[in-house]
Image (cartoon, coloured by chain):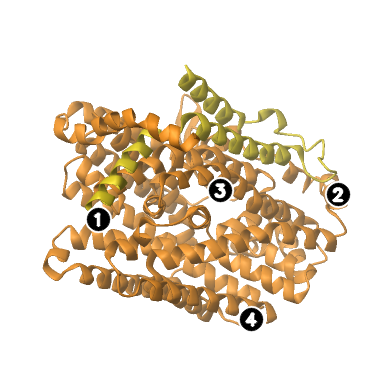
Chain colours: A orange, B yellow
């Protein structure tokens, strides 16, 4: 109950931040101000808000839950694989997006694609695919809010009320504060959940009597010893996970966030410190998730461990319903909350609960990004601004925020979470497969709109194909089901966690084929006009002559 | 030449992620509780930060900065 009060106070604070941002913008609110904070974010807000934007409910809860079941491999799969790829993509692509946004006034990636490849409806198709892949992400954010508030209050706040509160607060500060409010809230959230890791580790470590004994005990038991190695995961699967972070720069909310920096210089600390922030939040979460396997003195965790033991003992013999029930009981998404409630004093559990809530409320930037995309790529592009004026554009954006959040909440109440978890899983692969579009637009003169169309259609078709396959061929408990073999080796398999193609995650062929289509189809179609190529590439060549001055000034 | 060295360094660090040598062992437990595989990847994360600092120092896209600076001075003139 008391932790829930801390969380409610926190929700009040973030709502106030949104209203404060609204007051600050009052009187001079343009579309660029509402959707991009007038491209004026400073160094600290840019770093923390960009990082916070990319962290989701999975960051604390999901990562510790995954580590509870799968062990230390979680960190290698989801954190260190991102530590190089994400900041590198910000360094190479984000900086270029920012420059082009500044030069040509772009507010969304689709505006860049439309201009760069001189296309209209192909841009609309890219918008549609991006939007469809983003919606489940927003819905799962609302669901995460309801579940977490309910768990933190010990069931005192029901799921429907928790979800409604979180949806209302997010809708409120996005509606009022636009990008400025969202960025400020994200900054506060990031500071909160970055502090969470070290404090939680200290408090829980002390409560458990130190981690050394817990680690030794885990190693003594044959059931838990593999959690401290990666022997249960194939090396090919581990390798293919490094393709997932390619999705980050292709996410519209990240692309749009890159446009909000005041100066290009602000990318420097963001690029360098991004891996450090990742380490600060993910290492404690993953480690605590693993250590929770020794916290049998916490009754709810003991129940989970018993459910897992029954699942392992009865593998292949349990009826499907019982297996599903046991699997749900054994899931570890709330182990960190349980550890905190057991080992931390009530007031600290409340504060740390607010830190968890901060990570859960990540749907704000996605809602704002979708609103920006709708108003810019559809409303303005098809003549809305010309007909109704610039003020109507901001009003449309705000109405879109209301409708989208309301719909997300209603869907979250009605549809089982597993469907959206699956959709989000494939949203990452889908966005990774869209990343060649950005690379081609920014670095390859010869790329064409037809190449972009081929990559986009391939992405949509492959995401759909994998989803249908997983629907038609259910996973079998604990083992891999081979669907297609080639020369005696499994080519296409249904694994307990998804699908494997030659032992790799589907994201690998999706990205490789998307890149290949971009190259082959571009080569087969007419070259883009010299005027447009000059505008994008010769200008940068000419400006490189001035680069010496910039370098001298920056370094001097 | 500098560009080639930096690209090779990025590829090398990418490959270091696949640490098959610590795949099946938790030992040594660093500080008495941290399995070596997890410790390695924590260090890897910090090594990525160091590499990125090097890239920012040696390969920063000054030409982009120059073009945005010239745009800013143009905006100032218009004002």
Q: Are marks 1 and 3 in contact (CB under 8 Å)?
A: no
Chain label for disc 3 = A
Tell me the residue at 57%/33% (across/down): B51
- The residue wearing badge 3 is A496
Cα gap from disc 4 to disc 2, whole angstroms: 34 Å
Chain label for disc 4 = A
Chain label for disc 2 = A
- The residue wearing badge 4 is A5
- Which of these two is toward me, A249 or A433? A249
Residue A212, which numbered label? 2
- The residue wearing badge 1 is B79
- A550 shown above or below A179: above
Residue A460 location, x and y as percent? 31, 47
Are both tags, 1 and 4, on one chain?
no
Residue A201 location, x and y as percent? 75, 57
- Which of these two is toward me, A545 or A104? A545
**Could you say whether the residue bearing mark 3 is in a helix, strand or loop?**
loop
Are both tags, 2 and 3, on one chain?
yes
Badge 3: few (under 14), some or many (20 or more) residues near its Cα, within 10 Å? some
Residue A199 location, x and y as percent? 73, 61
Badge 4: few (under 14), some or many (20 or more) residues near its Cα, within 10 Å? some
């Amino acid at each position: 109950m008391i932790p829930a009060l801390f969380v409610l106070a926190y929700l009040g604070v973030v709502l106030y931040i949104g209203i404060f941002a609204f007051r600050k913008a009052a009187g001079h609110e343009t579309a660029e101000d509402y959707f991009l904070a007038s491209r004026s974010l400073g160094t600290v807000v840019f770093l923390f808000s960009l990082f916070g934007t990319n962290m989701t409910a999975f960051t604390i809860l999901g990562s510790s839950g995954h580590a509870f079941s799968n062990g230390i491999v979680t960190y290698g799969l989801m954190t260190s694989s991102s530590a190089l790829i994400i900041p590198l993509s910000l360094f190479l692509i984000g900086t270029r997006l920012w420059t082009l946004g500044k030069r040509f006034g772009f507010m969304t990636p689709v505006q860049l694609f439309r201009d760069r490849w001189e296309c209209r409806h192909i841009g609309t198709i890219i918008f549609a695919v991006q939007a469809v892949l983003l919606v489940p992400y927003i819905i799962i954010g609302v669901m995460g809010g309801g579940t977490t508030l309910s768990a933190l209050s010990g069931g005192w706040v029901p799921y429907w009320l928790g979800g409604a509160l979180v949806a209302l607060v997010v809708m409120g500060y996005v509606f009022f504060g636009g990008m400025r409010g969202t960025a400020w809230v994200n900054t506060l959230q990031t500071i909160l959940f970055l502090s969470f890791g070290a404090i939680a580790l200290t408090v829980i470590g002390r409560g458990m009597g130190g981690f050394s004994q817990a680690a030794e005990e885990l190693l003594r038991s044959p059931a838990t010893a593999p959690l401290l190695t990666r022997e249960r995961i194939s090396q090919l699967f581990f390798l293919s996970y490094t393709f997932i972070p390619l999705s980050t720069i292709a996410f519209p909310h990240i692309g749009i966030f890159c446009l909000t920096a005041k100066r290009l210089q602000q990318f420097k600390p963001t690029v360098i410190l991004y891996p450090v922030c990742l380490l600060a939040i993910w290492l404690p979460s993953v480690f605590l998730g693993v250590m929770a396997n020794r916290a049998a003195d916490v009754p709810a965790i003991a129940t989970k461990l018993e459910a897992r033991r029954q699942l392992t003992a009865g593998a292949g013999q349990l009826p499907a319903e019982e297996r599903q029930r046991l699997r749900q009981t054994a899931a570890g998404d709330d182990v960190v909350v349980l550890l905190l409630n057991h080992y931390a004093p009530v007031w600290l559990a409340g504060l740390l609960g607010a830190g968890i809530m901060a990570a859960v409320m990540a749907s704000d930037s996605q809602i704002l990004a979708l609103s920006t995309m709708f108003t810019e790529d559809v409303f303005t592009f098809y003549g809305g601004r010309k007909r109704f004026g610039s003020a109507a554009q901001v009003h449309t954006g705000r109405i879109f925020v209301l409708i989208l959040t309301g719909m997300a909440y209603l869907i979250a109440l009605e549809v089982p979470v597993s469907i959206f978890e699956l959709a989000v899983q494939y949203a990452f692969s889908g966005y990774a497969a869209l990343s060649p579009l950005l690379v081609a637009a920014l670095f390859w003169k010869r790329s064409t709109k037809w190449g972009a169309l081929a990559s986009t259609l391939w992405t949509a078709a492959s995401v759909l194909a994998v989803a249908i396959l997983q629907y038609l061929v259910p996973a079998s408990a604990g083992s891999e089901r081979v669907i297609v073999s080639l020369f005696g080796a499994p080519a296409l398999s249904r694994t307990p966690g998804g699908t494997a193609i030659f032992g790799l995650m589907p994201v690998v062929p999706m990205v490789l084929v998307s890149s290949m289509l971009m190259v082959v189809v571009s080569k087969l179609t007419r070259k883009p006009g010299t005027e447009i190529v000059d505008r994008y590439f010769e200008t940068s060549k000419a400006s490189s002559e001035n680069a010496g001055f910039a370098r001298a000034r920056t370094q001097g | 030449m500098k560009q080639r060295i930096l690209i090779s360094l990025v590829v090398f660090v990418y490959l270091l992620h696949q640490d098959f040598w610590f795949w099946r062992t938790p030992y040594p437990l660093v500080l008495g509780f941290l399995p070596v595989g997890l410790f390695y990847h924590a260090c890897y994360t910090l090594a990525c930060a160091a590499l990125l600092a090097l890239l920012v120092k040696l390969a920063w896209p000054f030409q982009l900065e120059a073009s945005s600076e010239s745009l800013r001075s143009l905006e100032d003139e218009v004002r």
